[in-house]
Amino acid sequence: MVGNGYETLTVTGKSVRSARGTLISGDRHLSDGKHPPVVVIPGIDVLLDISVNEAMDALLARRDAQRLVAWLAAMPRAPVVVAAGCTATFLLAEAGLLDGREATTTWWLGPLFRERYPEVVLQERRTVTCADGVACAGAAMAHVNLALFLVSRFRSPALAEQVARQLLLDSGGRQACHIDYSSMNDLPPVIRRAEEWVKNHLAEPITITEIAHAIAVSPRTLARRLMDTVGRSPIKFVQHLRVREAIHLLQNTMLSLEEIALRVGYSNAVSLRRVIIRDTGRRPNQFRRVGE
């Protein structure tokens, strides 16, 4: 972004074609020595027919990606603002821009991101983070939230709020309720077994000892693997699965919140409502289908 407009920078300065076939004209190339005051890096498609780890290895090994990482690493820190979303957050991490800072990424890449960049304070439950002028957005549609963040910062919070209202955007800023561990290709078998067992016992009181015994590991091993893989303690892991199931029931049944609470292991609707609001930033009735 430059002044009141924007420029498209490419590695060569020439036009490039997006993964969807759109031809994008390049205004200038990275190596001209100029750094605009705001840099926004879009998400980059990765191959989904191989493991997530292999896909990110392939992305980061590309020559254009390496040149971009080098350019980012050499960028003067102030007053430049750098923003990236989804897979592009890995480029920021590769350039060292996220070291010691809070960041987010799309939830299904969270475990891999945490493994690769342990020095980054990953907050994948958040939709958008910003620390010292480096902003990150989570899953694909979080680019909208990232755009609102930039509008708020460089124009006014009031304008950003007005745009959000006109577009009927949810400003909760959290990805937590959308995280689905079962869709993560590289999730370790021990975590998959734990998830499956918990899902089958949601209505019951659950302890870490019971989960560990059911999947034949020690409680300490389970706690360590959960924290290393999904960044949650066993208690938070169970709570997340309960909230996710509660949201599913809110969206797909006419059960009362009291009935749903009992089905997912909470003693009453008040307790479940409190947890849903805390984890998602939304009230339970906001998950009901329109017209029901």
Image: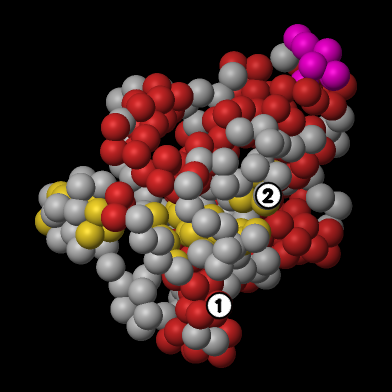
Residue at image x 45%, y 69%?
37
The CA distance from mark 2 to mark 1 is 19 Å
Looking at the picture, how far across and down is residue 249, in whole percent? 59, 53
Indicate whether residue 219 is drawn in magenta.
Answer: yes
Indicate whether residue 6 is drawn in magenta.
Answer: no
Front-most of residues 14 and 217: 14
Residue 87: quadrant of the picture: top left
Quadrant showing the N terminus: bottom left
Image position of 140 with respect to 146: above or below:
above
Q: Which mark is residue 153?
A: 1
Q: Is residue 269 visible?
A: no
Front-most of residues 136 and 206: 136
Q: Is residue 61 left or right of residue 259?
A: left
* Residue at the front extreme, as displayed: 33
Residue placed under numbered mark 2 in the picture: 101
The amino acid type of the residue labelled 2 equals Arg
Q: Which mark is residue 176?
A: none
Looking at the picture, how far across and down is residue 160, in whole percent? 51, 83
| Residues packed near mark 1 inside 10 Å, few (<14), some (14 to 19) or many (20 plus) | few
Q: Which residues are magenta?
A: 216-222
